[in-house]
Image (cartoon, helix red, strand yellow):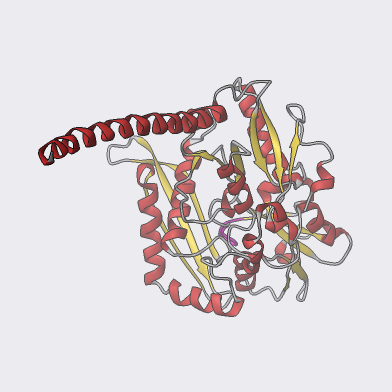
Amino acid sequence: MTGAMVHENETTVPSAERTVGRAAERIVGRTAERIVGRAAERIVGRGTVEAPWRIGTRGSLLALTQAGHVRDALIANGQQAELVIVKTAGDQNATDPVQKIGVGVFTAALREELAAGTVDIAVHSYKDLPTAQDPRFDIAAIPARQDPRDALVARDGLVLGELPAGAKVGTSAPRRSAQLKALGLGIEIVPLRGNLDTRISKVTSGELDAVVVARAGLARIDRLDAVTESLEPVQMLPAPAQGALAVECRSADTELVTILSALDDPGTRAAITAERALLAELEAGCTAPIGALAEVVESLDDDGRVVEELSLRACAAAIDGSDVIRASVVGSVADAADLGRALARELLELGARDLLSVTEESAELTDSSNPSPMENQPMSERSERIISTAPSGTVAPNASEVQP
């Protein structure tokens, strides 16, 4: 009897294992099918009139215009797309400096919607993105960059050198503030937030003598008529990636990555790669007083042939304008990231770390590792989505009503 029981155990246990194994295979198979099915639902059939690609964007006129360009480019390539407006923490707090309310304040909500699958594509002003890469997403395209320079909008058509001592100049960017102070013009820097129309109105109303903004933004909303001077990089280096867009999607959506890659501009990507690599190596966020500009330039090799190289110049400034450290490098376009890191190390050797430490203390910058209070709120409390089906070539209807 004992032997029979042993024999029974030896035969029935493997049988049970096979039974359980088959059941597990069925369960795992069904789970895999559901996962694959959900992923397929996101992609299969998208880009059609019935199911256009959903492009997440902020609701300001500038953001809508930028996203509209991406939408129109997709439509020109045979893909249907529409805009989805997402309200971000930066839109809900239009008074505090960006460095106070948190790094990534204009991009976190868009990325959460992208991760949740409620949008397929997010369009960012590239300079607003944190330097740390997020493995969930892929910057599938960096379209051709607009003019990256800063622009002065001043009363009476004045240029920067014509502003009188004590003139009030609006900007909330530590980089702009530091470089303006370093010029020693005796102007007063006034903190300023708001969309471009709001900032320009501070000048036309007489509240401020001038404001400094990104020229690219004014170009995109067709307001270059307001510019009284485009500031050359020798006066003021722009923010890393200023004037460039980041067109982002989920890394897992390989088909969409391929579709979006048709919008990529290789020269712009190389320049932005160098500038962002410099920023990351300096361990500085998008609100730090760091200026950088990379450009693809033509040069002659040893044999007299015309070749393309990447020229990168950068600066680190004390927030009070007491010191500005500058450096530059030229190298191969293919080595864009290495060039950025190398130039960052040169800035550090010249004392940039001490300069940035003083800046952080005096400006009371928020640690980028700590999310802003808004980022701790549930998505339902801080993000609203409005589907826009504006026709090609236009921004969303009532765009002015949804500006921050």
List the single residue furthest toward the left.
Answer: 3
Q: Is residue 112 magenta?
A: no
Q: Is residue 380 above or below residue 375?
A: above
State the residue in front, 187 or 291: 291
Residue at image point 53% right, 56% down: 130
Please state if 296 lies on the left or on the right of 18 as rendered.
Answer: right
Please state if 118 lies on the left or on the right of 258 as rendered.
Answer: right
> Is residue 154 in sight in this rendering?
yes
Q: How many labels sit on residues?
A: 0
Tell me residue 163's x, y (percent): 76, 67
The quarter of the picture where residue 56 lies is: top right
Residue at image point 58% right, 61% down: 103
The quarter of the picture where residue 303 lies is: top left
Q: Is residue 371 above or below residue 312?
A: below
List the single residue furthest toward the front.
Answer: 1
State the residue in front, 70 or 200: 70
Location of the N terminus by quadrant is top left
Tell me residue 168's x, y (percent): 78, 71
Q: Which residues are magenta?
A: 232-237
Residue at image point 36% right, 34% down: 24
Residue at image point 35% right, 46% down: 335
Tell me residue 42's x, y (percent): 56, 30
The quarter of the picture where residue 93 lies is: bottom right
Q: Is residue 120 above or below residue 132?
A: above
Tell me residue 132's x, y (percent): 46, 56
> Is residue 320 in sight in this rendering?
no
Query: Overall secondary structure of the magenta stretch?
Result: loop
